Image (cartoon, grey):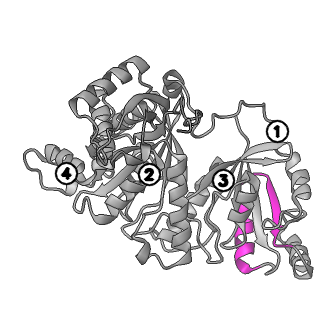
Amino acid sequence: MSFTIAIIGRPNVGKSTLFNRLVGQKLALVDDEPGVTRDRREGQAKLYDLDFTIIDTAGLDEGAKGSLTARMQEQTETAIELADALMFVIDARVGLTPTDRAFADFARKANKPVVLIANKAEGKHGEIGAMESYALGLGDPVQISAEHGEGMGDLHEALSALVPEAPEEDDEVEDDEDISEEEAAQRPIRVAIVGRPNAGKSTLINHLLGEERLLTSPEAGTTRDSIAVEITWQGRQFRVFDTAGLRRRSRIEEKLEKLSVADALRAVRFAEVVVMMMDAQNKFEEQDLRIADLIEREGRAIVLAVNKWDLVERKPNQISQLRTDADHWLPQVKGAPIVAVSGLMGEGIDRLMTAIQEAYAVWNRRLPTSALNRWFEQAIQANPPPAVSGRRLKLNYITQVKARPPSFVLFCSRADAIPRSYLRYLINSLRETFDLPGTPIRVTLREKANPFAHKRKRPS
């Protein structure tokens, strides 16, 4: 089992910067504003030959019972319970504060090994602050600059006494590498939950986990980082990403919200299936359509989830109407699974997880070449391509070049002359014939080489 270390300390001492440095990616949002991190975030850290799990936490801060600040601290306390050791971080440029002293007592009471980190220790002011930290009674401070990567050798020496050697593991498959349907059925499915602010994304994931793992609040914008959690559902593994709400670009003014949105977009690109969550009382709004269009452009499988279904007055044929509305407003992903759910009450969760698995299977599907070209001939006979400038367009054959999403190359005589409307006809026919509901389909046009192009005309 992996050795786990939680990074703790008061707000704005550089915990998330250190987390990003150790995992080797900018996974956690970093900003000068205190309190950016709210949910706890896990990552796989590597420091030279040391491999361990690391947890970034919200800054230890006091708040009224039940408040967002208090619940952020509860998340931090949970991380401390899960950890095998702690890294207590202070800001060496500021020196010790009363809050540092109070939470050093908190760290001692955890009764776990503590490595004292004096971050931002570059320069003379950092040296003085690091010396002050001896007063905490947590041992010798390790002076580092997480932002500039200084002091990592000293940190490695401090952690070497704690972290056991990890066994070697096979590398994971690249994000969009084409894999067989059998391999796809065995791998954890990467799922991103996206939508407008306050659509209930975190509430849904908490219900799947069976615990208050992610902070929720009636206030829009509670989630900032894209947090990944591992879920097992009826024997199948999922890696689910909760994301910040996506508002219209014109309404995004704060730098922090821009970072949150960028983080959510990265989660979409990393995912294999994206669940677009809508509020049942305000569904298919303009921003919902923009988000669906983004998912389709990124080539990800899509599942539509209409949340807060428990708040809607029940009427006959409501689900059928949802299907009709989805196909009307989102023709580019026609047939995408649409599920009515209540993240709070747990309604429709089984149907949602089934829809995710089905969408993933379609996204990974490969079509037999012989069946594909039989369909192609029939589609052309049923609706021949139009003549352009009096010249007939010749479509030769089609082949699938990859899955994830299903992608095809169509060989033809004049690629630039084929109307987009005819391509849409082919894609819709392909979708219907081979049962590819909702998944993005890519068709690339390629002109077949002219075997006589190298021969020159004889002079008359």
The quadrant in which residue 106 appears is bottom right
Of tags 2 and 3, the one toward the viewer is 2
Kindly give the residue lying farthest to the left in the view shown: 316
Q: At 55% from the left edge and 37% from the top edge, which residue is drawn?
A: 457
Q: Residue under label 4, please give it.
A: 325
Give coordinates of residue 374: x percent, y percent: 33, 20
Sequence-wise, the earlier of marks 2 and 4 is 2
Q: Residue under label 1, please give it.
A: 164
Relative vertical location of residue 26 with respect to residue 99 in this rendering, above or below: above
Q: Which residues are magenta?
A: 97-121
Residue type pointed to by label 1: Pro
Kindly give the residue lying farthest to the front in the view shown: 460
SS of the residue under disc 3: strand
Q: Residue under label 3, please give it.
A: 55
Which quadrant is home to the N terminus?
top right
Spatial CA span between label 3 and label 1: 17 Å
Residue neighbourhood size for the residue with mark 3, other residues' Cα within 10 Å, grouped as few (<14), some (14–19), many (≥20): many
Give coordinates of residue 298: x percent, y percent: 47, 50
Relative vertical location of residue 70 with respect to residue 56 in this rendering, above or below: below
Residue 226 within the magenta-colored segment of the rendering: no
